[in-house]
Image: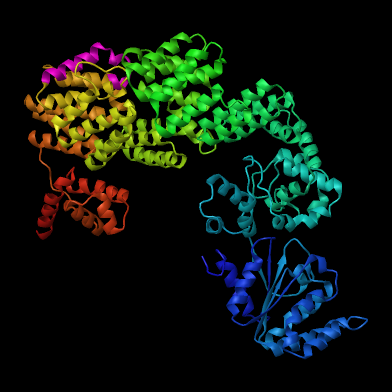
Amino acid sequence: MDTDGLVGRERERAALERALSGAHSFAVVRGEPGAGKSTLLDAAAAAAGVRVLRAAGVEAESQLPFAGLHQLLLPLLADDPHARDVLDLMLGSASPPDVLTLGNAVIGLLAAARPVFVAVDDGHWFDQLSAQVCAFVFRRVGVHGVRGAITLRTDVASPFDRAGLPEVEVGPLAREDAEALLDRSFPGLDARLRQQVLTQAEGIPLALVELPRTARHTELETDLPLSRRLEGLYAGQISELTPSSRRALLLAALDGLSSLSAPRRRDVERRLRDVDEAIGRGLLLVDPVSGQLGFRHPLVRSAVVQLATPNERRAAHAELAEAHRGDIERRASHLSAATIDPDERVAAVIERAALSATRRGAAALAIEWLERAAELSEDPRERERRFGEAAFVAGQSARLQDAQRLLDASGHPGSVDAVLTAAYAALYREGDVHATHQRIAATVAASGDELDDAILDRLLNLLLAISQFAGDPATWTVTEQLVDRFAGRVNPHALIHRDAWGDVVRRGGGVTDRLRGAFAELSEGEPWDVMRLTVAAFYVDALDEFRPYLRRMVVREGEAGAVTNVMTMLHVVMLDQINTGQWADAEATGHRGLDLTTRHGYTLFGYQFRAFLGLVAAARGDHEAAAGHRTALESWAGPRGIGFLTNYAHAIGALSALGAGDYETAYRFATTVTTPGTFTPYVQQAHRTLLDLVEAALHSGRPDEARRHALAARDAGLPDISPRLALLTAGALAMTSEEPDFDAALALPGAALFPFDSNRIRLAYGAWLRRVRRPAHARDQLSRAAEGFERIGAQGWAERARTELRAAGASFKTGAPVVLTVQERQIAELAAGGLTNKEIGTRLYLSPRTVGSHLYRIFPKLGITSRAALRDALERLEVQSSD
């Protein structure tokens, strides 16, 4: 980035410098309107380091003889007495002097004034006589040490076009330079607006710095309004078109025709009529190879629309609405713009388009269309309903402030929709589960019989979500009673959610079959329907069947869709990645989710991502990170009674302690989740920590409790609920049996689907084989377990497997010497000295996360699993190096 205001333009600056160093010492700078020609001219003038004579062409003076030359020479009056003679020669005679006489006089003035740099901006607006004289002078004055440049537009004919001067073409900025200019001019610009500016500006610097200033709340598919300066770039050419040509351009602009660089719209091109005049004036371009038509630049399209009168625009939209009767969204867009007064027919079309937009992942656009449908409603009840629908979609799109604004606009701020919106805000942002549950339950109990089925369904699904977070029997009892009361009116999916999200141990049997039916009926349903069903699929470990729905929805919704649901679906994606051993991907998903939730202020969802990141850290053996996440969860979720998160905190503690070999602590954490021999109702971690509790009990001298818990899993029917629970139950039974059948457990389908769980069972199998003196078989199982743990990054568990291997008689050949980079060595030594990741980062100018990533790589290189072993490992490394 340059101090003279230019961003990029290295090629153009170099070309201009070469031109000014040539025989003419003058150059033409040519480019599109707003491309930055004037800025490049100013930079060249400043770099010359001499006096600058400036002139700028003005369209209003383009018919005044010698107006441009007069402007250029006027500053010389104070310095050179001959300047008056030249001016008199131009203006004082009845007939204009010939170009040769006047040109030589001007050359003499410039030669006397040297060194000077002549800067002529917008030379295409110079009058004919001035342009002729200047072209004569600029070709010859270089021998006198005078340099200069003149800027011309590519779309306006000029006498300078035949001046024979070297030319420098100034095109649009490259994408990275356009982004740099926009970010420098408007740091912190909203991401959606930033993208819209970059698209509409198409690399034109003037547009990049003007469009954000005029931006206002507009539909996603509407161009940003042009400033007067941008509008003026093409206003003259557009206004000179015949009425029929202007109408044709307006129809094309409103119908979606863009520049040649945009995707081709053949349907629009087929409807183009009467555009020859616009092509002749350079407003429309024709690709010489494909014949494709397009506006010269998106700004031309914007100017065409903006210069039309409101009545002209409405008439064009009405015509286009008829042309698009087969396309619900395009028809609705044009009907919306063509209609002023309330019209129920139009409102209904726009509402159907909003539903279509929601289902294709454009919830933000759907909100605006629902709001417009409400405004055009003739019936007050329909108006209120549509505003409420818009508020609901806004709530699902992480736009709670918009949701409240829409409810205020409905004129019924105390409606059930308002209760829903307030509940979403309290839940997502504050984690207020109990008070929110009470308000929603009271609303359903008091008004459920009178409520619309769709509203009732939303209230009950919200109750189910709140109850899931609360994770306690009292809350769930109220929710289940209300769901049972209205079971005949709600979507059957709500019953699937109840059985999977709540007491899955007692209600989870058969849920997978019901999910198959639900997904088969769903097709391209609304995003919140897909989100809820994928959450249910995770709780019964059936995501491998329905993963395509999940991935497609995350990609489809993005930032312009139902963002709140994307957050939840990212939760599910991350949990799926954890279960399937894709821990690096899970971490990346977790950090992406944290960024998203932080940006939108969704604190509850942010702590969910922290819970899952804590699980990954615990499984990997990063005990410091695991403890940090656990403590954060306990301090935030504990006082709020969010049992879902506090149980995750306990699960993190149990898994981390198991990896560190601290079995007593692991037992304490595991039994905080559930009592041995039971599975606490409505606690999702109760059955998911089955192996944790069994292992902790076995290794802490409580074999009877371990066996009782394994038998309780079998008797509760866990194997019938999901493949993972079948694997965990079989593994727990084998670990606690006198005659274990580990092979049967590892032959289950879940063994391939859940590698961390299956390798834990394989590790226990190998340890048992070693104890019963079957070392060869033990080494086989333990080797496979160690390799499996290594593959997914479970270093602590891999070390446990290697320890058992050594005990089973395996020997490890020394491989290549351990090599740490300079930075890894620094980090390792500082960590061995007791410094935290944050303290190390401060010393080495790294982020704590980067320090943690380095330690993840350092530990397996040194063959250790914790910071406590670092000092001894570094000493061994020192000894090896000296040898």
Residue drawn at (41%, 11%) of the image: 481
Residue drawn at (46%, 20%) of the image: 440
Image side of residue 752 versus residue 94, left or right: left
Residue 839 among those drawn in magenta: no
Q: Against 426, is 62 above or below?
A: below
Residue drawn at (43%, 34%) of the image: 429
Location of residue 846 by image quarter = bottom left
Residue 717 among those drawn in magenta: yes
Q: Nearer the viewer, residue 830 or 300?
A: 830
Image side of residue 225 versus residue 599, left or right: right
Colouring convention used in this rendered image of the protein: rainbow
Residue extent of the magenta highlight? 703-725
Image side of residue 549 versus residue 160, left or right: left
The secondary structure making up most of the magenta span is helix
Residue 588 in picture, x, y percent from top left:
37, 41
Location of residue 161 by image quarter = bottom right
Quadrant in which the C terminus appears: bottom left
